[in-house]
Amino acid sequence: MAKPADLRLGVNVDHVATVRNARGGLHPDPVKAAHAAIAAGADGITAHLREDRRHIRDDDIVRLKAELTKPLNLEMAATDEMVSIALMTRPHAACLVPERRQERTTEGGLDVAAQSNVLAPVLGRLRDAGIRVSLFIAPDPSQIEAAIRIGAPVVELHTGSWCDAVAARSAEAASEWERLRTAAVAARGGGLEVHAGHGLTYATAEKIAALPQVVELNIGHFLIGEAVFGGLGTAVKFMRAAMDRGRSA
């Protein structure tokens, strides 16, 4: 049996900026957090520049791009403003996500099937600039098919429904897991690189790491929460160990 591809960990530093912005000023610094995460074993850094700048700000993106020794993944809405910023800063990757100002966090995946006419040209502009583009989607066959149809190289499967069901000890956890597993197989079979993220903990990251089709996990809120108790470096190391256990299984 072929050895599964290495599993990368992207650490999202948005909520370090959330704490900073709650009081204003410069502390805590999401760029400092990014350096700490990389030192502890993160393979890349994710940051979501929202329309309302509720956490990450424009200067954070500029500094992250200038200072990081690992890839920067810019989460962004498919708007003219965000495309212009991405083309100016040239992150390693851009993950297109849905965005509503009222939401507390990203509440669902892109409806690629319904928005192909909007997403395809954005994907093309970013790809032509040398930026790897991923689409954040629900683990749904129609969305995977649409992502393939518009030429996306990568999809990131939204793991939130499964993680919520696991946390609630709901009977739906098993069916949500099967939905994710099936989607990962279908996406990889269609030639897509498969990432996953949203709501992952040590336990759920360990489980999903066992899916050989998934090559990257992007995790933020849980790690920043754990950092309150033991430090960000320790949280990243624990997450990396959980992922490695899952992969070896």
Image (tube, rainbow, N blue to C red):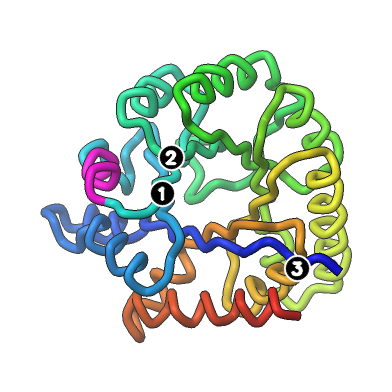
From the image, tell me which residue sits under label 3.
3
SS at badge 3 = loop
128 w.r.t. 14: above or below: above
Closest to the observer: 105 or 246? 246
The amino acid type of the residue labelled 1 equals: Pro
Name the residue located 41 percent from the left edge and 49 percent from the top edge: 71
154 w.r.t. 247: above or below: above
Left or right, residue 57 beside residue 74: left
Majority SS type along the magenta span: helix
From the image, tell me which residue sits under label 2.
92
Left or right, residue 24 beside residue 135: left
The amino acid type of the residue labelled 3 equals: Lys
SS at badge 1 = loop
Residue 11, position in %: x, y?
Answer: 44, 60
Tags 2 and 1 in contact by the CB under 8 Å rule?
yes
The disc, 2 or 1, on the residue closer to the chain's N-terminal end is 1
SS at badge 2 = loop
Left or right, residue 97 beside residue 55: right
Name the residue located 35 percent from the left edge and 77 percent from the top edge: 233
Regarding residue 98, the answer to whether it shows in the image is no
Left or right, residue 204 beside residue 186: left
Residue count near mark 1 (Cα–Cα under 10 Å), binned few <14, some 14–19, many ≥20: some
